[in-house]
Image (cartoon, coloured by chain):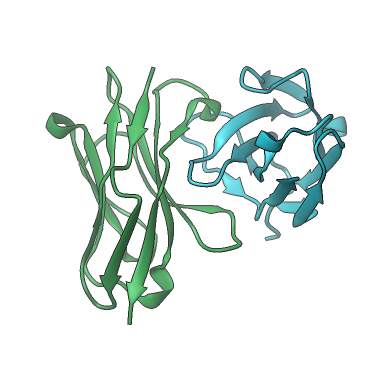
Chain colours: A green, B cyan
Amino acid sequence: AQSVTQPDIHITVSEGASLELRCNYSYGATPYLFWYVQSPGQGLQLLLKYFSGDTLVQGIKGFEAEFKRSQSSFNLRKPSVHWSDAAEYFCAVGAGYSSASKIIFGSGTRLSIRP
Amino acid sequence: EAGVAQSPRYKIIEKRQSVAFWCNPISGHATLYWYQQILGQGPKLLIQFQNNGVVDDSQLPKDRFSAERLKGVDSTLKIQPAKLEDSAVYLCASSGGQGINEKLFFGSGTQLSVL
């Protein structure tokens, strides 16, 4: 069975600084990987996803993530954060050829932005 | 395009009482999901519907939780009787299909506090 770990519970970065949120997964085959963002009082919104192909994936709001099979990682990055990026970020992993019901979410990383 | 609607936004009940949550998915979406998100954790799937049939309810505590999706549109999730550990945000999501590559659209959730 697949699993996902987000090692950082809470991260604070200064506005305009770069950001990297860590995500490690466990799955025997090539996983389907996702990053979701949850702003206060809002539902989760898909930022980006990786299924196959280019290991560097571009998403919405200027985010990108890189799939590294050798490290079992799918870290989320943004070159310059904005105050509006303050939110909870969830990495998720799914098994190929299965239903969306089999997507497993990590415990999340809360991002705070320092003015 | 209207998003996934959920009500109520907040609910406070005492243990052993019953409670119901309502979800209206995006128009035309055949697949509907209910997730439980406990504070500090990622969302955990409770049940998935395809139209008005249950696809996956393996993680639904069936002794106290029930869900239905009459006519394949709106859905209700009920807890009876509630326990303290049921305190969580209950998220509804919908998608056009049930494949793992389908984009999930989440509602804002119902925050349940059981006292």
Number of marks: 0
User: Could you tell me which residue is drawn at 33 percent across and 82 percent down?
Assistant: A115
User: Could you tell me which residue is drawn at 62 percent across and 37 percent down?
Assistant: B35
Q: Which of B107 and B101 is in front in this view?
A: B107
* Residue A91 in the image: above or below residue B44: below
The residue positioned farthest toward the left in the image shown: A70
User: Could you tell me which residue is drawn at 87 percent across and 36 percent down?
Assistant: B18
Q: Quadrant of residue B71?
A: top right
Where's residue B84, x and y in %? 70, 37
Q: Which of B93 and B42 is in front in this view?
A: B42
User: Could you tell me which residue is drawn at 52 percent across and 30 percent down?
Assistant: A100
Q: Is residue A59 left or right of residue A46?
A: left
Where's residue A32, x and y in %? 36, 32
Q: Quadrant of residue B36?
A: top right
Q: Is residue A46 left or right of residue A8?
A: right
* Residue B8 in the image: above or below residue B94: below
Q: Can residue B25 be seen in this view?
A: no
The residue positioned farthest toward the bottom in the image shown: A115
Q: Is residue A66 visible?
A: yes
Q: Which of the image's four quarters has the C terminus of chain B?
A: top right
Q: Nearer the viewer, residue B73 or B19?
A: B19
Q: Which of the image's four quarters has the N terminus of chain B?
A: bottom right
Where's residue B82, x and y in %? 78, 33
Where's residue A107, x and y in %? 42, 41
